[in-house]
Image (spheres, helix red, strand yellow):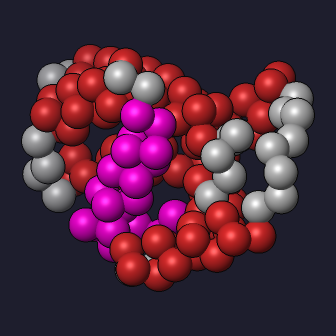
Amino acid sequence: MTPNEYVQIILQEKKRESPPKTVDEAAAYEVAQLLSGNFTYLLYEALWMNHFEMDFITQHLENLHDSKNHFGLVYFIFILANAVDFAMPAQFVEMSGQDELIPFLSAAIIEDWLDYDTNHEETEYDG
């Protein structure tokens, strides 16, 4: 999926979006965690294997999350995936098109990313 296709899907989702709904936060975060766990580690590894500057990427993701730029974080993840021809799950696109779910997806991604970043650095020097 190209960035243009991704944006088109998001815009279509926004047009279909009904009035704001009440979100079960625990359920939304659990779904986001499952989704993130499905791709975050694999994406990190693909970027690392392609010699991307992981410290810079991690810092940028942290800055986006800390500034509550959840849309920016999710879109940056998509751009990174596109850069290494990594196929994002369809659920990622669906969830990123729903305003009320973006903060949960962003939180799950940054949590998994930082966890893997910490553990990956430890094993990187072992071999």
Looking at the image, can residue 19 be seen?
A: yes
Q: Position of residue 1 (x, y in %)?
A: 46, 80
Work out whether 56 lies above or below 6.
Answer: above
Please state the total of marks drawn on the protein image: 0
Quarter-of-image position of residue 83: bottom left
Q: Position of residue 102 (x, y in %)?
A: 60, 41
Task: Compare residues 25 and 54 and report the one nearer the observer.
Answer: 25
Above/below status of 13 relative to 47: below
| Residue at 76% from the left image edge and 61% from the top image edge | 17
Side of 50 where 65 appears, left or right: right
Residue at 11%, 51% (x, y): give it: 51
Q: Position of residue 126 (x, y in %)?
A: 21, 22
- Is 72 in the magenta? yes
Is residue 55 inside the magenta stretch?
A: no
Q: Quadrant of residue 61?
A: top left
- Magenta part of the chain: 69-88
33 to 91, vertically: above or below: above
In the foreground, 27 or 87? 27
Tell me the residue at 35%/23% (across/down): 67
